[in-house]
Image (cartoon, helix red, strand yellow):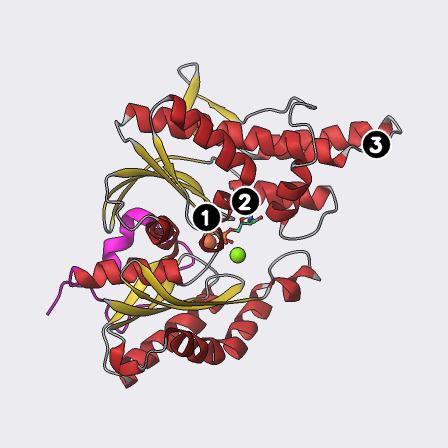
Amino acid sequence: AIVLAIESSCDETAVAIVNNRQVCSSIIASQISVHQQYGGVVPEVASRQHLETINGAIAKALEQAKLDWGQIEGIAATCAPGLVGALLVGLTAAKTLAIVHKKPFLGVHHLEGHIYATYLSEPSLEPPFLSLLVSGGHTSLIYVKDCGRYETLGETRDDAAGEAFDKVARLLKLGYPGGPVIDKLAQEGNPLAFALPEGKVSLPSGGYHPYDGSFSGLKTAVLRLVQQLEKDGGEVPITDVAASFQETVARSLTKRAIACALDYGLNTIAVGGGVAANSGLRKTLQATAAKHNLRVLFPPMKFCTDNAAMIACAAADHLSRGHTSPITLGVESRLALTQVMKLYQPAG
Ligand code: ATP
Ligand code: FE
Ligand code: MG
């Protein structure tokens, strides 16, 4: 089906149109430069920016796709999780358009969207597979059983992977967001320069949790390392610190993803979320997976971070199964991926 979707859960106002797994248009109006002066996303500023940008983005998406409202078969928006005020702007716009143009309306779970991003580069992919979801707010290993059916097998006990990149970038005074700049610096540095903790989670019974991880200890270790290097008086070898940090994150995520895929007999790992763009993770995970005869898939670079094409792709799959959302659907700041089917009512 041809679906138009809006994504406004954080600091990107995005509108896209897809025909199932094929992208017809994708508009991403980033607010990053507005939030950069504050060193992070300011919720009220985000809502206002969405409001100012959204109508133009919708018009552009239709224009770029060369489609009119008559050809659109469903209208969707991210409804959870995310910033409530920001989500409300996109969801209200989508509901209004659905009423005005008499189209089915669908709310979409943002993380289901990140999982669906892989279909945009690999349209023949079908469940079951393992999703390694690594974004600004989440780090999970998810058993993808079918559209709307997910089981979380592992997750971070504290910081998300993207959050770790952002926090380390802040302490290295590299600005926001941290992922892209650390990725770039790491390419010039030695990943073996400094040994850092991988963030294993101890089990009460002894040993370590096979799929859960932790990134806050790693961030603190980087802070201590930088403080020590500064105390020693020399210049901080920032590229080596970035490379060693990135390598540690990549190794830690890779170990747990591979163990999980092997234990559950899943031969494909689909990576999603902003950190799926990371060159170190891409390299380490690909190389290790190849040794175990596992297939690793990444979304196209521009669909790793927030976008509306991934939301439209998820909505199109739900719509093809007769799932639509009640027009009374609200937004939620938090919603487990296992609750996705609560957003839909059966056809008719
Ligand atoms: P969530 O999806 O959990 O709600 P989010 O939408 O804010 O969070 P995304 O847009 O998926 O997260 O990803 C943004 C995150 O990805 C940021 O933390 C950013 O630093 C990180 N990121 C982006 N590019 C890279 C990269 N090349 N390497 C590492 N991290 C990156
Ligand atoms: Fe996201
Ligand atoms: Mg973002």
Q: Where does residue 137 sit, x and y in percent of width and height? A: 49, 48
Which type of secondary structure does the marked residue at label 2 adopt? Answer: helix
> In this rendering, would 132 be left or right of 30?
left
- Disc 1 marks which residue? 273
- Disc 3 marks which residue? 230
Number of the front mark, 1 or 2: 1
Q: Name the quarter where the N terminus is drawn.
A: bottom left
Residue 6 picture quarter: bottom left
Which type of secondary structure does the marked residue at label 1 adopt? Answer: loop
> In this rendering, would 167 be left or right of 315?
right
Give the spatial CA distance, label 2 vs label 3. Answer: 26 Å
Residue 166 included in the magenta stretch of the image: no
- Residue type, numbered disc 1: Gly
User: Which region is colored magenta?
Assistant: 321-348
Residue furthest bottom in the image? 100
Which type of secondary structure does the marked residue at label 3 adopt? Answer: helix
Residue under the point 53% across and 32% down: 250
- The answer to whether the residue bearing label 1 lies less than 8 angstroms from the nearest atom of ligand 1 is yes
Task: Judge whether residue 97 can be spotted in this image.
Answer: yes
| Residue 195 to residue 117: above or below | above
- Disc 2 marks which residue? 162
